[in-house]
Amino acid sequence: MLIQDIIAKKRDGLRLSREEIEFFINSYTGGTLPDYQAAALIMAIFIRGFDGEELSHFANAMLHSGTVVDLSHIPGVKVDKHSTGGVGDKISIPLAPLVAACGVRVPMVSGRGLGHTGGTLDKLESIPGFSVRLPLDAYARIVEEVGVCMIGQTEELAPADRKIYSLRDATGCVPSIPLIASSIMSKKLAEGIDALVLDVKVGTGAFMPTGEKAEALARTLVDIGVRAGKRVTAFLTRMDDPLGVAVGNACEVIESIDVLRGGGPADIRELTLLMASHMLVMGGVAPDPAAARLRCQAALADGSALRKFQELIAAQGGNPEAVERHDLFAGAAHATSVRADRSGVVRAVNSTAIGMAGVVLGAGRRQVTDLVDPGVSLYVRKKIGDPVSAGDVLVDVHYNDDRGLADALGRIAGAYDIGEGPADPRPLVLKTIEG
Ligand code: URA
């Protein structure tokens, strides 16, 4: 097979065969295909797209470019959840131990912060000693013994995605629905799941700002999963203002602990219960979402979900006392606030700007090699629909390094649209797509 024939075919809008797609993925991952030819094909795919069958072959070839974890020796249906990313989106942290406490095993391979969005791995690493870099045999053992394990992508999982993602990043080919969907699903299908819940974010803090694009992405993700023989449900959820109150790393784990104690902000609690209930039904331990919700509420009330989180922390090398002692988390030396310059109602919040304010203070990375500052915290005190008086605190800002401070404060002030009310937030869940 000649790669230039394959590039020309896609350039001209023709369908690629399974053999052609596998040839590309295998030779690129194996190092025999140079970046310039891979980049040409990826750009052709970006422009021309894929039909459902091509996409399924592409995702499958990426999945099989490395190890596909087999957890079939572990009893029960293994269910994971994935979010396309938002600001203040810490749902995975209370969700995974909650679901495991209710008897459904959760194998979870998560990501780091990307752009303005935070990453589950960066947040978990703010727990003293917690390791997200575990070999796959330790991951499988923890899923079996504890019921939940949360790690990062290893060298062995979907290596084609790793290479293609970097290439896309360097060639302006990230925002493509088929390329995003195959990238996400190749990693999710490699981690050993039977079923998956997807949280596809829509709004000012999401990668897909419009409902149509988010829905197209959700349908594509579900389609890849279903073709691979998995049960998949996608929720399109609101990301118009940051989720919860805390935006950062340690502060988001602490907010997650509040949820595991039965408290926490209402939106975080609601999304956690919604996703967890579906995971319990998919996992076969509850007959319907209403019964599952009651079971989840009981696990929050009786402390079993919080104890499961402590077990998970201990199994991954962390100090489980952090759940009781928040002084064990990194903090911030300085604090200031952004205040409203007028009275009115919060009509809109640009969550991407809030997320970027965290990034410039060190909660995220400017460059891939940067370390995150776990103590940087933003506390969002006013959300869409809230009345404000001039001088009210909009966001409390806790920081260690003041180099990005003026920039961050400007971004936060500019993120708020305050004017005549009333303004009602959209519902938290905009649509459900069942696979
Ligand atoms: N997350 C991924 O894993 N891949 C993408 O392409 C985009 C977001």
Image (cartoon, grey):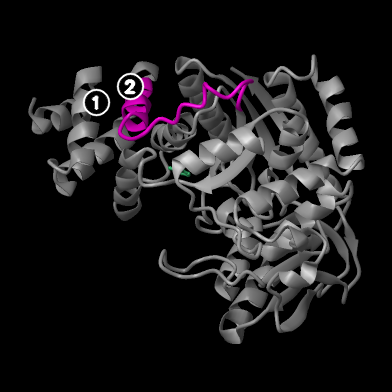
Residue count near mark 1 (Cα–Cα under 10 Å), binned few <14, some 14–19, many ≥20: some
Residue drawn at point x = 66 percent, y = 35 percent:
147
Q: Is 147 or 12 nearer to us in this picture? A: 147
Which secondary structure type mostly characterizes the magenta part of the structure? loop
Task: Please report the bounds of the magenta region as a residue range.
Answer: 55-78
Residue drawn at point x = 77 percent, y = 61 percent:
321
Quarter of the picture containing the C terminus is: top right
Does 261 sit left or right of 29 as displayed? Answer: right
The residue that mark 1 highlights is 21
* Callout 2–callout 1 Cβ contact below 8 Å: yes
Residue drawn at point x = 54 percent, y = 69 percent:
372
The residue that mark 2 highlights is 57
Indicate whether 241 appears above or below 247: above
Does 60 sit left or right of 383 as displayed? Answer: left
Q: Is 393 or 307 nearer to us in this picture? A: 307
User: x, y percentage for residue 291?
Assistant: 86, 21
